Image (tube, rainbow, N blue to C red):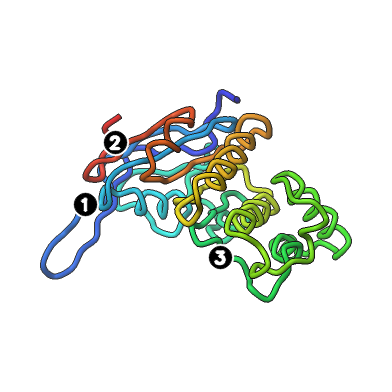
Amino acid sequence: MTNTPILQLEKVSYEYRNKYQTVRAVKDFSYEFFKGKFYAITGKSGSGKTTLLSLMVGLDVPAKGVIKYDGINLKEMNMDKYRRDCISLIYQDFNLFPLLTAMENVMYPLKLKGLKTSECETLAKEKLNMVGMDETFYKRYPSMLSGGEQQRVSIARALATGSSILLADEPTGNLDTENGDIIVSILKNLAHNNDFCVIVVTHDLEIASVTDVQLNLKDGMLVT
C-alpha cells in the first residue's frame, strides 16, 4: 500500500431538493482511500450509500467539499476521462451486453480506447484469467453463464479499463452464498495482490467483516 491516497473526500456534502423539502443525503463526509486495501461502505437503506457511490464515480457533483483523485480535484479533471480510465463500477445486476460473448464484453472498453483487435483479445484473456475464467468461457454469451460467472466477466471488464479503483455496488446481491463468497474472494485478492483500491457498497455485514476497513453511514454521516 502506498502512502498517498488514490481517492480523497474532504467534507463532502450532497443535497436533494424539491419544492417541499431539502434532504441532505451526504453530510460532511471525509475519508482517504488507498490502493492495496479492501473497503466496505455499509448502512441501512436511505443512509446515503448510493449517493456517496455516485459522488465517488463522478456521476454527481458535491454541493460542498472536495473530491480528489490521486491528489487532483475532480473539478479540474475531464469527467468523461475520469469515469472511463480512473474508476470502474461493478453492478449488482452485471450489466453485460447480452449479444456479446464474455470475451467481447471484456474487449469493449479496450476497443473504446482505440486498441487493435489483437491487443484487445490478449488483454481480455488476461483479465478473464485473473478472475478464474479460462478459454472454455471466452465464447459464451451471458445467457450461457451462471450469475457468478456473469459477475466475474463484469469484474474482468472493469479491470480492462485500466482503472486503479474498483467500486462494487452490492456485487453479491443477486448471487447465492457460494458464488457470493467467490466474488468477495476475487475482490479481496485484487486489492491485496494486485494493488487495486476496492470499495464495496453493501448491506451484508458478513461481506463487510472480511474487508480491511468498514465505513458505516447513518443519515448521510460517517459514524464508524
User: Could you tell whether 150 is left or right of 126 in the image?
Assistant: left
Q: Are marks 2 and 3 in contact (CB under 8 Å)?
A: no
Element carrying mark 2? strand
- The vertical placement of 200 against 148, above or below, is above
Q: Amino acid at mark 3?
A: Asn
Label annotation for residue 175: none
Q: Position of residue 194 (x, y in %)?
A: 68, 34
The residue depicted at 68 percent of the width and 52 percent of the height is 156
- N-terminal of the two: label 3 or label 1? 1
Element carrying mark 3? loop
Q: Position of residue 215 (x, y in %)?
A: 36, 34
User: Could you tell whether 128 is left or right of 73 in the image?
Assistant: right
The residue sitting at the right extreme is: 118
The residue depicted at 74 percent of the width and 66 percent of the height is 140
- The vertical placement of 162 against 191, above or below, is below
Name the one closer to the observer, 181 or 105: 181
Q: Amino acid at mark 1?
A: Arg
- Which residue in the protein does label 3 denote? 95
The residue sitting at the bottom extreme is: 99
Q: Position of residue 16 (x, y in %)?
A: 24, 60
Name the one closer to the observer, 179 or 132: 179
Front disc: 2 or 3: 3
Q: Position of residue 82 (x, y in %)?
A: 57, 54
- Which residue in the protein does label 2 denote? 222
Element carrying mark 1? strand
- C-alpha gap between disc 3 and disc 1: 29 Å
Q: Are marks 1 and 2 in contact (CB under 8 Å)?
A: no
- Which residue in the protein does label 1 denote? 24
